[in-house]
Image (cartoon, rainbow, N blue to C red):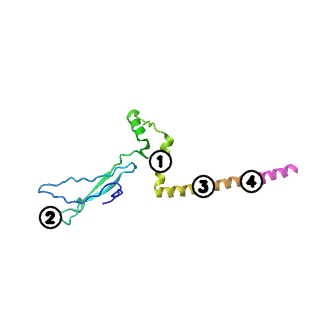
């Protein structure tokens, strides 16, 4: 059953039957995972036992589902700098910091590219950029008005007083 992991993208769905002999309380099943080069957060899916065909057994509601978490083995944000990051983690770890020897600009670019692949993040970023642009325009207009006020009105008043 799909959770945040989707069948065909993160794992291969499977169906089958299990036979429990008297005294057996657990069985192992194999679910093949799909390995790709895309970094994803930890995703999950459920394995569900259906009670419709159960014979000489009772499938309890709370015991009929198992949640499976898939922890990605890809490097965040992409595998482009995987080798450099792995080598850095193996060679330069001290007690307080981890020194990663990978191009920081390249990592930042890959991070932004990863973010903008997500439609929700992309729309949110565009909204935030627009709101910031409007706020900056407002600030610039206020600054312009203050400068205009000082230059035109206050300076004009002091020039008139100097003439008297």
Residue 39 located within the stretch drawn in magenta: no
Q: Which residue is mark 4?
A: 148
Q: Secondary structure at mark 3?
A: helix
Q: Rounded to the nearest whole Å, what is the CA distance between mark 4 and mark 3?
A: 22 Å
89 w.r.t. 77: above or below = above
Range of the magenta residues?
Answer: 151-163
* Residue neighbourhood size for the residue with mark 1, other residues' Cα within 10 Å, grouped as few (<14), some (14–19), many (≥20): some
Q: Which residue is mark 1?
A: 111
Q: Rounded to the nearest whole Å, what is the CA distance between mark 1 and mark 2?
A: 52 Å
- In the picture provided, is 102 more to the left or to the right than 49? right
Q: Which residue is mark 2?
A: 55
Callout 1–callout 2 Cβ contact below 8 Å: no
Which of the two discs, 4 and 1, labels the residue nearer the N terminus?
A: 1
- In the picture provided, is 41 more to the left or to the right than 60? right
Res 133 label: 3
53 w.r.t. 9: above or below = below
Q: Where's residue 68, x and y in %?
A: 29, 54
């Amino acid at each position: 059953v799909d959770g945040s992991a989707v069948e065909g993208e993160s794992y291969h769905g499977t169906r089958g039957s299990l036979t429990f002999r008297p005294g057996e309380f657990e069985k192992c099943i194999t679910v093949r995972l799909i390995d790709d080069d895309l970094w994803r957060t930890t995703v999950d899916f459920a394995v569900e036992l259906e009670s419709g065909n159960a014979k000489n057994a009772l499938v309890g509601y709370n015991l009929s589902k198992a949640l499976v978490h898939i922890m990605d083995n890809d490097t965040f944000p992409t595998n482009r700098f995987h080798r450099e990051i792995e080598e850095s983690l193996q060679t330069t770890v001290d007690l307080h910091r981890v020194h990663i020897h990978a191009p920081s600009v390249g990592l930042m670019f890959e991070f932004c590219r990863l973010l903008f692949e997500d439609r929700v993040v992309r729309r949110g970023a565009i909204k935030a950029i627009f709101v910031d642009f409007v706020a900056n325009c407002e600030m610039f207009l206020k600054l312009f008005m203050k400068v205009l006020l000082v230059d035109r009105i206050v300076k004009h008043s002091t020039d008139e007083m100097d003439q008297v």
